Amino acid sequence: GDPPREPPFFFQKPSDAVQVVPTGETADHPYPSLTQDYHHEIELVVALHEGGRDIPIETALDRVFGYTVGLDMTRRDLQAAMKEQARPWEVAKSFDRAAPMGPLHPVSEVGHFSEGTISLSVNGELRQNADLNQMIWQVGEQISKLSEANELLPGDIIFSGTPANVGPVVCGDVMVGHIDGLSELSVRVV
């Protein structure tokens, strides 16, 4: 949303939510329990090599180690139920392997990302397609804002938000995530 440019919000995933997918492989990604409505969200992923509190926007990108392509997988039916009851979303967002991501590409090799295609195809059909320049909050701004609420640490990973057209996947679906300048991410729902 952006009415007008509402403050960003954040939620956490535990470290066991990460599923690292090697470049060039299609990894099996388990359909989770407790849901009948499992959704994809393609995202630019940021890994920090330096943390801090109250990080100024002007120096936030200096703390980035690298980037990769990631999926913020969501049990959408559980998320809707939690929203309706005004409860936290963790059961919908924070489960085993809920965050497939590719290997990290160091900033020294790929630079920083403020534009370029971000897209997701499911079984060869384009589902999400946008440009990183359409992000409401750029990466440096997100790091700065998040550091106001939490001390950031080296090794922290930030999924930076998804473009429009998130949607459901079922067993057998193959998702391929793309961001210009990074290795593609490919997973098969099993």
Image: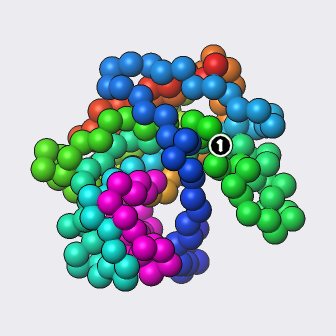
Furthest toward the left, the residue is 108
**Residue 168 visible within the image:** yes
Q: Position of residue 7 (x, y in %)?
A: 53, 78
Q: Quadrant of the C terminus?
A: top right
Pick the front one: 10 or 50: 50
Per the image, is 161 magenta?
no
Q: Residue at x 27, y 72 (%)?
A: 60
Which color scheme does this rendered protein use?
A: rainbow
Locate residue 35: give its quadrant: top right
Q: Can the viewer see residue 177 in this picture?
A: no
Stretch in magenta? 133-159
| Residue bearing the label numbered 1 | 95
- Secondary structure at badge 1 equals loop
User: Which residue is located at x 24 percent, y 54 percent?
Assistant: 65
Q: Amino acid at mark 1?
A: Phe
Q: Is residue 126 left or right of residue 156?
A: right
- Residue 49 at x, y = what percent? 26, 58
Q: Position of residue 94 (x, y in %)?
A: 64, 49
Q: Residue at x 48, y 21 (%)?
A: 27
Horizontal side, residue 14 vs residue 144: left or right: right
Quarter holding the N terminus? bottom right
Label 1 crowd bin: few (<14), some (14–19), many (20+), radius 10 Å: many
